[in-house]
Image (cartoon, grey):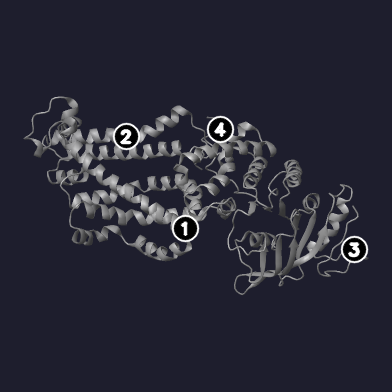
Amino acid sequence: MSAGFLLIHAKPGRTWTTLLSWTLFALGIALYFYVSQARHRDNPEDRVMPTVTQMARGMFDAALKPAEDDEAQAPATTFTQRFLGSMLWKDTKATSRRFFYSMLLLIPAVLLGLHMGLFPYVGAFFLRFVLFFDKIVALSLLPILFIAFGIDELAKIMLIVIGVTPTIILDTFNLTRAVPAEQTVKAFTLGAGDFDVAYRVVLKQIAPRVLNSIRLNLKAVMLFLFAGEMIASTDGLAYRIALLRRHMGMDVIIPYVLWVAMLLFLVDFGMRLLNRQLHPWFRES
Amino acid sequence: MIRIDNVAVSYGTPPRPVLEAIDLRIEEGEFVCVLGQTGCGKSTLLRLVLGCEQPQTGRILVDGREHRQPDRTRGYVPQKYSLFPDKTVLDNITFGPEVSEFSLFGRLTPSFYRRRREFREEAFEYLRRTGLRKEDARKYPDQLSGGMQQRVAIAQALMTRPRILLMDEAFSALDPGTRKDMQRLIRELWRATGTTILFVTHNTQEALRLGTRVIVLAKESPDQGSRVMLDLSVPEPCHESDLPHLVHRLESVSEGTRPEVGQAPRFAGPFRISPAC
């Protein structure tokens, strides 16, 4: 301690770093328990801050009890069967499906951005319009979408498309523009055609950065997805959360929120692994 | 082989002239070094020959044809960003023949894989000739030093057997030792392949060591475009002992300072001198 308390030049050890990084988690959990217990002491019927046992029971019901409208089916026996018939699984499946479709719709967005960046006529045709679209607050379009596309899946997926694709298009456009001119000239002098340059040279080298930009936009995708589900849907994780709000079902809402966070983390982590696997030459800087 | 007829280029508004009244004939098999200060338009001249830019007046004929965009008749080695970062050294070298013979979907045919094996064997031959080891073939450009990257870039450009090779400050980012090795290498390859080389550099010594012909571009005054100030043929590589003298003379031309008393009058237009070496 003779050196005094170093600030910028401090070099905390491994143990200290780990310890410090978990402190806020521990504090948060402890605080929750403390407040929740205090509230339950005052009012055993408290529904705002359920205890761990209540949450565990709520989650157990959500994950292993058959979903409401499936009760007519034959009773499931094994753990997997019960899980596959549960509310949690049904909601996760519905949300995942919408998420997957919106991810698929990002592929044309990436290709559009690539062509806009490479082909001047395509850029001239689309750029101003996409820039305009990018400024529209997607959620303000929600009523219009529900009126125009009905309250089906299409409206929800369109919301995600309108909300996220302009960002992805513009990001890809900028990444394409950032590829040094030498690369395209070189490719042409080696006998490549325009589409060889687009797909074999430019797309391949911006791919890891595009994937990273999609990773950064995962949260926006989820935001629009949840907004759509909360307002007009009959299944999905966000629908459940919105539904349980009416019953003050905090014992399920809190685990659901954590479940969503974990799923999103896993998707992001998977994409990071995929990126590293597909592009071993790419070093993040 | 390359004919540059009365070419002028200017950029921006109001137009700022970069090149004016450039007239050059470059014959097959020449090794031409274009020398000049930063901003004198020597890279512009190279881009004109490549076809990336079009002159405002005059025309450029390569093999009797005007070119609107770069193609495989003219190989290109820039100072950097020459290699595709996502491809291994081997794939970088075979890229040329692969895209020349197979379209995007042509890669799906079995004949592609047969041909690729042949390309790869040829690529190893070029690797050897440019002084790279077999183990380097699996590496990515990022894992190579600057000199090695330029070796790969040369091998990559030569794979498609261009008749003209355009090099833009190709060795300027290298340290002096590596630079000398590379100069020796390109000179050897030029002799062996008979490729016409147009080499842009700002380094006078490099130009004199490499070229069979040195062209100096310079401006007479700041508001004029660059012209060919000196067109020097160097039939034999200069002796190291003659270099300082020649370097001094050439630099005085390219910097626009008055040459020593008793020399050719200042800016007498393009003239040919036979150096004493």
Of the image marks 1 and 4, the number of the one nearer the N terminus? 4
Residue carrying label 4:
A3
> Disc 1 on helix, strand or loop?
helix
Residue B182 on image: x %, y %: 73, 43
> Disc 4 on helix, strand or loop?
loop
Residue carrying label 3:
B260
Q: Amino acid at mark 3?
A: Glu
Does the rendering let one see residue A251?
A: no
Residue carrying label 2:
A27
Q: Give neighbour class at mark 2: few <14, some 14-19, many 20+ (Cα, 10 Å).
A: few
Report the Cα–Cα distance between label 2 and label 1.
Answer: 49 Å
Task: Mark 4 vs mark 2: give the one in front.
Answer: 2
Of the image marks 2 and 1, the number of the one nearer the N terminus? 2
Measuring 42% from the left and 56% from the top, which residue is drawn there?
A113
Which image quadrant is residue B137 in? top right
Quadrant position of the N terminus of chain B in the picture = bottom right
